[in-house]
Image (cartoon, rainbow, N blue to C red):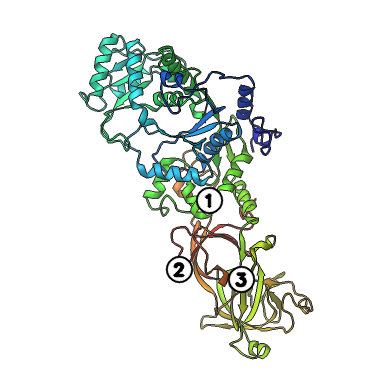
């Protein structure tokens, strides 16, 4: 865990009645800024806009503005949860607003499918982009007109030029960390010449890749990101939002700071890989503010360390490879670290938020062991998941003296148990004994090993919530495989009756009556990879796929689960936490996914 995550908690100054939050450097920055009145004259025009738009608006009611700006080119994964919770959480805690902005400037990879999925997952995590009756849902592509206007301004001021070098020539002339770059032969064109070429680019008069618009900064800068970075490229592609209106599209590093400024973002929080881009971020905004295009005060960028979770990969390229090559069953496969996959697996939004909160925010990238997330999940489910008995590897148990005890094989002896041991308001579960039960195959051994206390010939054990039974033997098939366990009920030992403690036993087994068992498909999931950092170094991550990450079996459930609804979660006693699959589960064909065990099975 990072140092920041372990830091002493401090009360939230903006919301003194709120729960105490762990301190981190971002909170310290925001609290300092608010104390110092860092943007006392910040106006907000009710929505994104240029300097004139915001100047006409009132003082911003939001004390701070943050944003979560995903590119809609894939499904969100567990790493994105850190940024989502940081940005929305800080805005909430300090009386601000957080924008959900789609950074959709790359038409070739972006689809409406991803837009819809991202909105769904942000809402599922418990966050809203609605603040004070206003929707702060925005699309970078809606700013294309302004971005082009800003580009013409930069060209007119001699701050940008159209470069017609090939991509290979540009790469060679850029230099490296030990060699300064070389000026483009097109760098010294007049603003009028560059403006004409830019308009030709916009009007589709040149093929894709023929030229780019570049900022004119310093080809000898030690920061390679300031060596005349590209601002626009020609790309004929249909955009999910703007269609075929444009054939030139802004580069991310150009678009992103403009988007922040148009939305009056105060604290632009991003991950560490963008730290080297901050000088260009500031350079661009200052130039456009000097020209009166953008409103002051300007946004400021802050970087935090990524959250890396062990036993997963979060590269979009590698996740796509897993899906397209059939190593998993889609983006929402419960083994995937995508949020849609984790939701289907049964992870709760509360557990993910708790994990993010517990790991804090630091200025260095960190690795978090998967057990931390599972611990947060167990802590959440323990207090609210109803209990039930289930048999995952069924073996029949025949009670030989059942009719002698109850007078008839047709008799059903009622039993009950609390739905949750600490939540009496959830009531009780009702089930019953019959002459044949389902038990776990591992609960019988013909020849027991030392310390084994469950069923073996001559030994007694308790049927949980039922009677003590004495094992009398077993039945086998022609190959010698046990096909049924034989036992007798011990009279007057029913749980909850005065004689329940008359006979002391060490073994307790779970069971389901064969007469009322609910047949079910059980999907037993585990970690997708066998090593904590499967894509570290030059290794082929596919060689580290866990062959036991998914096992499908048939089992039986107690009758209280007959009406389980998709996404309803339970603790199957002794086995762990399970969820009714949100896609495939039906009343007439139940499907349950294993979420996690009752304890960490991967501990050292």
User: Circle 2 — which element?
Assistant: loop
Q: Is residue 49 left or right of residue 28?
A: left
Mark 1 vs mark 2, CA separation in Å: 32 Å
Indicate whether 496 appears above or below 102: below
Residue that extends furthest to the left in the rendered view of this protein: 205
Disc 2 target residue? 589
Mark 3 vs mark 1, CA separation in Å: 26 Å
Mark in the foreground, 1 or 2: 2
Looking at marks 1 and 2 on the same chain, the residue that comes earlier in the sequence is marked by 1
Where's residue 378, x and y in %?
63, 53
Disc 1 target residue? 530
How dense is the environment of label 3, judged by Cα within 10 Å: few (below 14), some, or many (20 and up)? few
Residue 290 makes an appearance in the image: yes
User: Circle 1 — which element?
Assistant: loop
Where's residue 98, x and y in %?
51, 33
Disc 3 target residue? 442
Mark in the foreground, 3 or 2: 2
Q: In this view, does 61 lie to the left or right of 259?
A: right
Nearer-the-camera pick, 46 or 440: 46
Mark in the foreground, 3 or 1: 3
User: Circle 3 — which element?
Assistant: helix
Residue drawn at x 45%, y 68% is: 589
How dense is the environment of label 1, judged by Cα within 10 Å: few (below 14), some, or many (20 and up)? some
Looking at marks 3 and 2 on the same chain, the residue that comes earlier in the sequence is marked by 3
The part of the image, by quadrant, that contains residue 150 is: top left
């Amino acid at each position: 865990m990072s140092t920041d995550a372990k830091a002493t908690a401090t009360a939230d100054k903006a919301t003194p009645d709120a729960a105490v939050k762990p301190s981190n450097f971002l909170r310290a920055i925001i609290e300092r800024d608010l104390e110092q009145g860092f943007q006392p004259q910040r106006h907000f025009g009710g929505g994104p806009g240029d300097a004139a738009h915001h100047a006409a608006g009132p003082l911003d009611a939001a004390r701070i503005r943050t944003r979560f700006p995903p590119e809609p080119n894939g499904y969100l994964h567990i790493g994105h949860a850190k940024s989502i919770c940081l940005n929305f959480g800080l805005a909430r805690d300090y009386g601000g607003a957080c924008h959900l902005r789609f950074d959709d400037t790359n038409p070739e990879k972006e689809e409406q499918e991803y837009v819809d999925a991202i909105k769904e997952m942000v809402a599922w995590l418990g966050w809203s982009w609605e603040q004070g009756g206003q929707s702060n849902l925005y699309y970078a592509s809606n700013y294309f007109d302004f971005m082009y206007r800003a580009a013409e301004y930069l060209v007119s001021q001699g701050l940008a030029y159209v470069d017609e070098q090939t991509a290979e020539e540009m790469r060679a002339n850029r230099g490296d960390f030990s060699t300064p770059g070389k000026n483009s032969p097109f760098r010294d064109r007049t603003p009028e010449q560059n403006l004409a070429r830019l308009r030709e680019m916009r009007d589709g008069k040149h093929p894709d890749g023929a030229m780019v618009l570049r900022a004119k900064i310093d080809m000898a800068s030690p920061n390679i990101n300031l060596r005349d970075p590209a601002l626009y490229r020609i790309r004929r592609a249909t955009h999910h939002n703007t269609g075929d209106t444009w054939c030139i599209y802004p580069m991310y590093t150009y678009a992103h700071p403009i988007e922040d400024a148009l939305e009056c973002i105060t604290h632009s929080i991003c991950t560490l890989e963008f730290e080297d881009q901050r000088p260009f971020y500031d350079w661009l905004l200052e130039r456009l503010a000097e020209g009166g295009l953008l409103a002051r005060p300007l946004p400021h960028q802050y970087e935090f360390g990524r959250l890396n979770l062990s036993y997963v990969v979060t590269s979009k390229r590698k996740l796509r490879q897993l899906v397209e090559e059939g190593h998993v069953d889609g983006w929402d496969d419960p083994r995937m670290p995508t949020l849609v996959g984790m939701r289907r697996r049964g992870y709760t939004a509360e557990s993910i938020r708790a994990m993010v909160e517990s790991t804090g925010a630091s200025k260095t990238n960190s690795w978090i062991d998967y057990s931390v997330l599972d611990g947060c999940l167990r802590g959440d489910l323990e207090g609210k998941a109803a209990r039930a008995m289930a048999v995952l590897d069924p073996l029949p148990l025949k009670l030989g003296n059942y009719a002698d005890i109850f007078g008839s094989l047709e008799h059903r002896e009622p039993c009950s148990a609390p739905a949750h041991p600490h939540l009496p308001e959830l009531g009780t579960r009702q089930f019953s004994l019959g002459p044949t039960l389902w038990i776990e195959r591992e609960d019988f051994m013909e020849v027991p090993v030392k310390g084994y206390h469950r069923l073996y010939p001559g030994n007694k054990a308790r049927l949980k919530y039922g009677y003590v039974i004495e094992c009398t033997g077993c039945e086998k098939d022609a190959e010698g495989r046990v096909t049924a366990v034989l036992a007798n009920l011990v009279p007057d030992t029913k749980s909850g009756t005065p004689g329940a403690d008359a006979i002391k036993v060490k073994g307790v087994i779970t069971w389901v009556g064969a007469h009322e068992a609910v047949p079910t498909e059980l999907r037993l999931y585990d970690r997708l990879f066998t090593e904590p950092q499967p894509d570290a170094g030059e290794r082929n991550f596919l060689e580290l796929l866990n062959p036991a990450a998914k096992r499908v079996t048939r089992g039986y459930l107690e009758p209280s689960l007959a009406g389980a609804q998709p996404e309803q979660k339970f603790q199957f006693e002794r086995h762990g936490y399970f969820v009714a699959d949100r896609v495939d589960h039906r009343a007439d064909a139940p499907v349950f996914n294993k979420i996690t065990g009752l304890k960490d099975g991967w501990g050292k």
